[in-house]
Structures are given as structure tokens and as C-alpha cells.
Amino acid sequence: MLELRAYAQARGWTIIGEYIDECSGAKASRPAVDRLVADARRRRIDVICAWSLDRIERSLKALILLVDELAHLNVALVTLKESLDLGSASGRLMLHMLSALAEFERARIAERVRAGLQRARAQGKRLGRPRKAPATIDVPGGSVRAAAAAWSVSKSTAQRWIAKGRIPGRAPGQSLTAGQTPSAA
């Protein structure tokens, strides 16, 4: 952002707004880009300055459609990373080449991720968040209140011990039976 502001200041441009999307670029709906295009349609913008092409659109098709619309609106698009000014024919040629490469790179990354997940599944690895193990404690009296009384602790402490599935001072998985206290061996 600092580089973009400095570039705009060096060119003598007035910054109308900053459009920052927090969501993935792969999403079809990107609120900041939608607001940017709406402001361009309202003729509030003469130049769009972006860090790079992939910050604007991820797919070649969407980028070309956006550039065409901006050209019809007489809005220039400048990128700092690629040093592109899409007001010229050579800039538009470079845009098409770089967009194609960016889309190719994104597709390759997606292919590698899918292949890695498929390989992990084939090897029998469990994917995703680990499941929470159920409590392995035999609760005296069948309730938290009865367990707290049997263990001589508060209800909240008994509930926390039961939720964790073990009692401090015991080996994990070793359960208590009715009548035992946590300090008893």
C-alpha cells in the first residue's frame, strides 16, 4: 500500500479510495473489486493503480473482461509489479501474456494440492481436523455433581476433568471407578 501511495503521489494523482478485498481471489464475488468497478462506471476514477494483475482478477477471462470495460470507460490500469500501463498496445499484449501465465500457475497449484490430497487418502491418512476423543472416565454416580462430591472438588473442576477425559495424577486413558478420589492411587 505504501508503494502505491508513493507512486500516485509522484505522478500527481489524487487518491479517491483504496479497495482492499479480504476474501480469496478465487471467489466470483469480490466486494472491493465490485465497488471499484462501480466507481469507475460513475466516472469517479481516471486511473486504477494496482500492485499486480493477480490482485485485481485471478482468471484471464475475468481480467480481460475487466480491462475491456475499463477501456470503454476511458479508465487507465497501471500495475507496479509488472510495470504495465494498459493504455498502450504493448501494455495490453504484456497483460495477456502475464495473465495467461498467472492463470496457468494458479491451475498448477490447484492440481498439486488435489494430487497431494489424493495421495494422502490412498496412504490411509486421515485428513482434516482431528476428532475430539470422547471422555474415558467412569463418572461416579453418573453425573458431574456426584463426581464432584466423590472427588471432593467443585462441579466446574469435575466437569473440566471429565471433558478432558482424564484426571490429573493419572495416566491418560486410566479411568477412575466409583469411590476412588483423584489423589488415591
Image (cartoon, grey):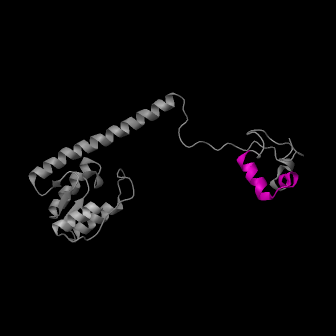
Q: Residue at horizontal 35%, vertical 58%?
A: 30
- The image quadrant of residue 42 is bottom left
Where 58 sits versus 5, above or below? above
Say if the magenta span includes residue 152. yes
Q: Is 145 left, or right, of 24 in this rendering?
A: right
x and y, in percent, of residue 149 in the image: 87, 55
Say if the magenta span includes residue 150. yes
Where 170 sits versus 158, above or below? above
- The image quadrant of residue 85 is bottom left
Q: Which residues are magenta?
A: 146-165
Where 120 sits versus 37, above or below? above
Q: In the depicted view, which residue is nearer to us: 27 or 106?
A: 106
Q: Residue furthest top?
A: 123
Position of the C terminus, as image quadrant, is top right
Q: Is 53 left, or right, of 22 in this rendering?
A: left
User: Please, what is the dominant secondary structure of the magenta stretch?
Assistant: helix
x and y, in percent, of residue 115 in the image: 41, 33
Q: Residue at horizontal 84%, vertical 47%?
A: 183
Q: Is 13 left, or right, of 54 in this rendering?
A: left
Q: Residue at horizontal 81%, vertical 58%?
A: 154
